[in-house]
Amino acid sequence: MRTTAILVLGAMLAALVGCGAGQARLANDLKATGLAYHEYHDEHKQGPPGWDELIQYAEESNNFPDAIRHVKEAGYELTWKVKFADLKEPMADTVLGKPTKAGPTLWMDGSVR
């Protein structure tokens, strides 16, 4: 009986740790997406028009294209073609990307909360 309880608790703990690792990866991938978005903006004076252009830019600049694909596949919606100079709110208060379901949000300043 104790062995079964220990195995069940171990399986539950492993599942929890796995969920934490998945969330940590998503948070890191969101940050990489924000960084690529900012770098694209620096070169083009506005944000990319869509996922395809952001991923292509990331591939060409070796800037974590797999992380950006992961964010796209996770169902995130980004704000496209943003000109930072036109923002009316501080970057820390402006959403760049949000999940279609539950999950962390990517802010225009590159933070993930």
Image: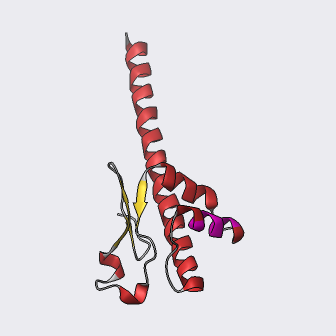
Quarter holding the N terminus is top left
Give me the residue at 52% from left, 73% from top.
48
Q: Is residue 19 above or below residue 25?
A: above
Our reading of the magenta stretch's main secondary structure is helix
Dividing the picture into quadrants, the one containing residue 82 is bottom left
Expressed as whole percent of the image width and height from the top left, the position of residue 72 reads 50, 54
Residue at image coords 46%, 33%: 14
Q: Was residue 46 drawn as part of the magenta stretch in this picture?
A: no
| Residue 19 image point, x, y percent | 43, 41
Q: Quadrant of residue 5?
A: top left
Q: Residue furthest front?
A: 49
Q: Is residue 54 magenta?
A: yes
Q: Position of residue 39 (x, y in %)?
A: 57, 78
Note whether 3 is above or below 63 in the view shown. above
Specify the quadrant that holds the C terminus.
Answer: bottom left
Q: Residue at x 48, y 61 (%)?
A: 30
**Which residue is nearer to you in this view: 16 or 86?**
86
Residue 23, compared with residue 55, is above or below; it is above
Colour scheme shown? secondary structure
Label total for image: 0
Q: From which residue to which does the magenta span run? A: 53-59
Q: Nearer the viewer, residue 8 or 101?
A: 101
User: What x and y, as percent, mark residue 108?
Assistant: 40, 75
Q: Identify the residue at the far top of this view.
A: 1
Identify whether 18 is placed above or below 3: below
